[in-house]
Amino acid sequence: MSATSHVAILGAGPVGLDAALACADAGWPFTVYEAADAVGAHVRAWGHVRLFTPWELNVSHRMRAHLTDVQSDGACPTGAELVAGLLEPIAELPELKGRIRYRTSVAAISRTGLLKHEQIGTQARAAAPFTLLLDTPNGENTAKATLVLDCTGTYTHPNTLGDGGIPAAGERALDHRITRTIPDTTHRTRWQGTVLLVGAGKSAQTAARDLAALPDTRLVWVVRSPAPDWGVVPDDTLPARQELADTAEALTNGTHDRVTVHTGTHVQSLTPDTDRIRIRVRLATAAGPHDVFADHVVSLTGYTGDHTLYRQLQIHECYATGAPMNLSAALLAASGTNTDCLAQPAPGIDQLRNPEPDFYILGAKSYGRLNTFLLRTGYQQVDEIVAAHTGSDGAPAAEVATAP
Ligand SMILES: Cc1cc2nc3c(=O)[nH]c(=O)nc-3n(C[C@H](O)[C@H](O)[C@H](O)COP(=O)(O)OP(=O)(O)OC[C@H]3O[C@@H](n4cnc5c(N)ncnc54)[C@H](O)[C@@H]3O)c2cc1C
């Protein structure tokens, strides 16, 4: 890093904050841009959910070095506990003081003076700083940086619920009535009546478990796969993850009188029906369509990061996962049939690099559609960036004054 370098970190989630600590430790000038008015906004949105990884896996070595009294045992925190016990204390460290710009959303990023198709894949692009277009409480302005770490996560960009991943007919018009985050069932009256749930991953399994426990809720669970394996990991070392898969399996086997699970099924259309929604599904077991009348629709079909931010940069995304190409290829090659996120290989810097020099996608967003990302992996990614850029001269210059 040169004396005139400046790092822009997009997002103050766990990985963005770890990257900020890494910059502080390395003595690199940096700014964190956070769209919300506090750190960990996405984690707060699922604050009622308990992580399946324990504290010891959720705290990076940097965080532990800065917060000597941070919990670091085998208990699994909720999202809210992770925010209160880890993310907020980090944001309050003197090293990060004044470095996080809240309510500042990065809307777009360019290479100053260069269009996307110019200097294709060359280091010449690195000679020009990045320009960031910012949405702030005082309107739009811009900032410059020479190294950009996009840690903006995925949780506010949910996938839709129709067949093959596109919206089902009528879904877009009813978007305001569809819940796309994990229900907080401590507000049990909120979920009275019939809930139609779509999805099969860990978020859907969590929702199914919690909704099935509500006495005044009838759950209809639509699962695309005819024989879901629920992501079971043989001899799972994470009991909370195993428990989710076991519960999903039990619900599918018809052990619960208020729960119906339709496997091999997809949603065809959604239509308003007074204060309910009529959902037409195509069942594996019937020739014709089947209608469900639901009071609530919960779609948990995964999340994918906002790719529009770097549309004007040279980013090579995998056509299958949407993750950066090199990382995606490494993950797909390593995964095979292994669904255990704990068994993933540590990312190397070559997997993290993009054709656009000095621009990295880190954290949950770096996995595209893949749902095996763990915090531990994000912290390893930060280690790789620090190692690759320490002592280098080609990285970011001090932030240039913002323009009105
Ligand atoms: C329900 C759930 C449970 C999970 N459980 C586990 C678990 O048990 N163990 C585990 O290791 N992982 C778990 N994960 C996966 C992963 O660790 C989390 O998604 C984690 O929050 C990812 O951290 P992150 O820093 O990459 O992104 P995020 O936490 O998503 O943070 C991104 C931040 O960027 C901000 N932002 C977004 N857009 C912009 C923008 N344009 N400009 C500026 N700021 C922006 C957001 O406000 C947010 O603060 C879970 C995920 C979910 C959804």
Image (cartoon, rainbow, N blue to C red):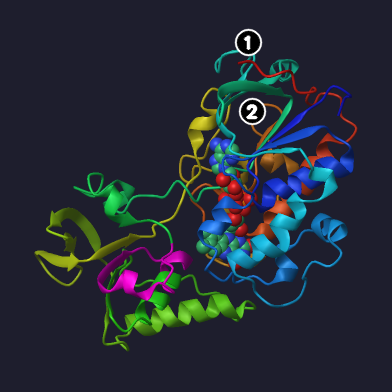
Q: What SS does tag 1 mark? A: loop
Q: Residue at x 18, y 53 (%)?
A: 269
Position of 295 with respect to 128 (left or right) is left
The residue wearing badge 1 is 113
Which numbered dot is residue 73?
Answer: none
Q: Residue at x 57, y 51 (%)?
A: 41
Going by the numbered disc 1, the residue's amino acid type is Gly
Q: Are marks 2 and 1 in contact (CB under 8 Å)?
A: no
Going by the numbered disc 2, the residue's amino acid type is Pro
Q: Quick one: which residue is furthest to the left in this view? A: 288
- Report how far apart the C-alphas of labels 2 and 1 lie in the structure: 17 Å
Instruction: Write the start and end of the magenta stretch as one range.
Output: 182-204
Q: Is mark 2 within 8 Å of ligand 1?
A: no
The image shows residue 9 at horizontal and vertical percentages of 69, 37
Residue situated in front as seen by the camera: 208 or 228: 208
Q: What SS does tag 2 mark? A: loop
Q: Residue at x 82, y 40 (%)?
A: 23
Give the mark nearer the N terminus: 2 vs 1: 1
Q: Residue at x 66, y 58 (%)?
A: 375
Is residue 400 visible to us here?
yes
For the C terminus, give its image quadrant. top right
Q: Is residue 255 above or below residue 134?
A: below
Q: Is residue 32 above or below residue 191?
A: above
Residue situated in front as seen by the camera: 93 or 365: 93
Q: Is residue 180 above or below residue 28?
A: below
The image shows residue 324 at horizontal and vertical percentages of 58, 40
Position of 123 with respect to 305 (left or right) is right
Which mark is nearer the camera, 2 or 1? 1
How many neighbours does mark 2 have within 10 angstroms: few (below 14), some (14-19), or many (20 or more)? some
> Is residue 215 a member of the stretch shown in magenta?
no
Which numbered dot is residue 355?
Answer: 2
